[in-house]
Amino acid sequence: MYFLRGSYSVRVSEPTADRQGVPVVTDVAVTRAANTATVLGGPTALIHLAGWTLLTDPTFDAAGTEYQNGPVVVRKTAGSALDPSQLPALDAVLVSHTEHQDNLDTAGRAVASGASEVFTTVAGAEDLGGAAVGLEPWQTRTLSKPGRTPLNITAVPARHGPVGTEAITGPVTGFLLHTDDGSAPTVYVSGDTVDLDAMSALADRHRVDVALLHLGAAGFEAFGDIRLSLTAAQAVEARRLLGDPLVVAVHAEGWAHYTEDRNHVQQTFDAAGAPLHWPTLGRPVTLPDPHTR
């Protein structure tokens, strides 16, 4: 995986459930008219924004799947709230990086390869081929169709670990989703990063209403004390630097390599007086109206 080369009032829409009782997204629960984020598991989220539907870091392999990456084994501990066949029509797929299976697994690659629009790093686009577009830091592409509000997708610099680990982890990007007219909330998807300076720079350029932060302080014994995604303390600081947006916890559960659990993260946010939303997998979270923040 990571080597040799990854205060708001929140309304929750009620989903239906499958035969196992797992919440699933339906057209009744979520419509294109709603601005919502639905975390499906790990880093994977469906985002409905300004009439567009996007999917982040697709991971759909079964729970218990293991991947050998260099000196470590990466193990998935929980499955997705949806199967790929249950996904709605996608306007774009956002892939923070392609090197690590906890952000793009085998089934996720199939989803990305079938998408008409895929945005990722420059190296990731070379890896995926097809429709994939590699974005340089701060580069913007715009989704545009007649009758819809154009949606900008801006690549935000990211670093998958402390300074000096770039050669090990490979390139990563975050994404900012925003409209020119401000009619929809501005959504930041961090990707796997600990680069707080980039988040500060982002806040200097754009207002951030919602931040999907990859938490869990990913780490491996083979790498000692190095943490490859945000610790709880870093996430609290990230929220402050970003201008106190609604923070939705992403990529904090479902894989075995997290070193901080939900209780620790929540306690850290509580101690700082910082709100944090833990989504129920498959349950849409209605995003705040940018005009009432």
Image (cartoon, grey):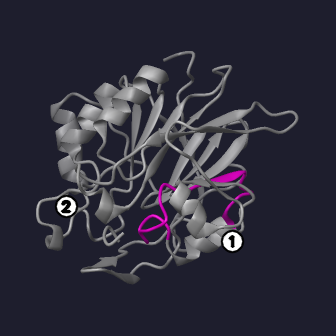
The residue tagged 2 is 259
Residue type for callout 1? Ser
Residue 136 position within the rendered picture, expressed as x and y whole percent measured from the top left:
53, 45
Callout 1 touching callout 2 (CB < 8 Å): no
Quarter placement of the N terminus: bottom left
Q: Which mark is residue 265?
A: none
Q: Which residues are magenta?
A: 86-104
Front-lying residue, 27 or 51? 51
Task: Please report the residue visible at 46 percent of the width from the left and 72 percent of the height from the top.
Answer: 79
98 magenta-colored: yes
Q: Is residue 213 above or below residue 134?
A: above
Residue 171 position within the rendered picture, expressed as x and y whole percent measured from the top left:
42, 56
Asked whether residue 98 is in view, the answer is: yes
The residue tagged 1 is 85
Q: Is residue 245 above or below residue 110?
A: above
For mark 2, give the secondary structure: loop
Which quadrant holds residue 111? bottom right
How packed mark 2 is, by other alpha carbons closer than 10 Å (few <14, some 14-19, many 20 or more), is some
Q: Residue furthest right?
A: 146
Asked whether residue 17 is in view, the answer is: no
**Chief secondary structure of the magenta span?**
loop
